[in-house]
Amino acid sequence: MKRQAGAVRVLVVDDSVPCRGAVCDVVRATEGFEVVGDVGSGEEAVELALRVEPDLVLLDIRMDGISGFETAERLRELRPEAVVVLASAWVEEAAAGVERCGAAAAVYKRDISPAVLEELWERHGAGVVPAPAPAS
């Protein structure tokens, strides 16, 4: 996958394939953002994050294996500069765990849109400078 210069690199983590696909579609439709990976478990997210170095992680909380909360904790340890956002159908539960797991925010999956992505990045990613595209 060719990396866009200066784009916000997004990792999407959700065990529901249709939800994950829909979120990826929104990210791809948002100018200045690109999907650098999408996986269905926390374990896969941690492993992939080390390779693709996402700027933003959109993370479901209820998954088989490690939960989104534990995944967020691990991601914050491995990539403290990444902005982790809990994206869930259970936003009250997610919001209650934001501070505990080190996530920046929680949003309803159904509310993810280009405007929401831009707002999240403006609010929480302002200090993060997306890496330039590698030389070809």
Image (cartoon, helix red, strand yellow):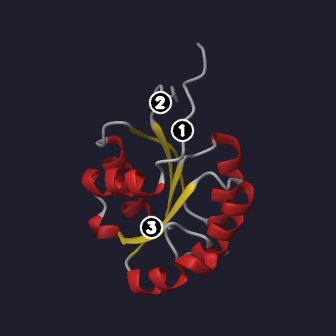
Q: Residue at x 37, y 36 (%)?
A: 32
- Tags 2 and 3 in contact by the CB under 8 Å rule? no
Q: Which residue is mark 1?
A: 129
- Residue 16, disc: 3
| Marks 3 and 1, how far apart at CA | 30 Å
- At label 1, counting other C-alpha atoms closer than 10 Å, the crowd grade (few under 14, some 14-19, many 20 or more) is few
Q: In the rendered view, would you say 32 is above or below 120? A: above
Can residue 67 be seen at all in this image of the molecule?
no
Q: Is residue 124 visible?
A: yes
Neighbours of disc 3 within 10 Å: few (<14), some (14-19), many (20+): some
Q: Quadrant of residue 97?
A: bottom right
Give the number of the mark in front: 1 or 2. Answer: 1
Reading the chain from its start, which is encountered first: label 3 or label 1? 3
Residue 62 position, x and y percent, is 52, 78
Residue in view at x 37 percent, y 78 percent: 89
SS for tag 1?
A: loop
Q: Find residue 64 and report its horizontal and vertical position in percent.
A: 60, 76
> Which amino acid, by three-letter code, is at mark 1?
Val
Residue 14, labelled with which disc?
none
Q: Amino acid at mark 2?
A: Gly
Q: Residue at x 46, y 86 (%)?
A: 93
Amino acid beneath label 3: Ser
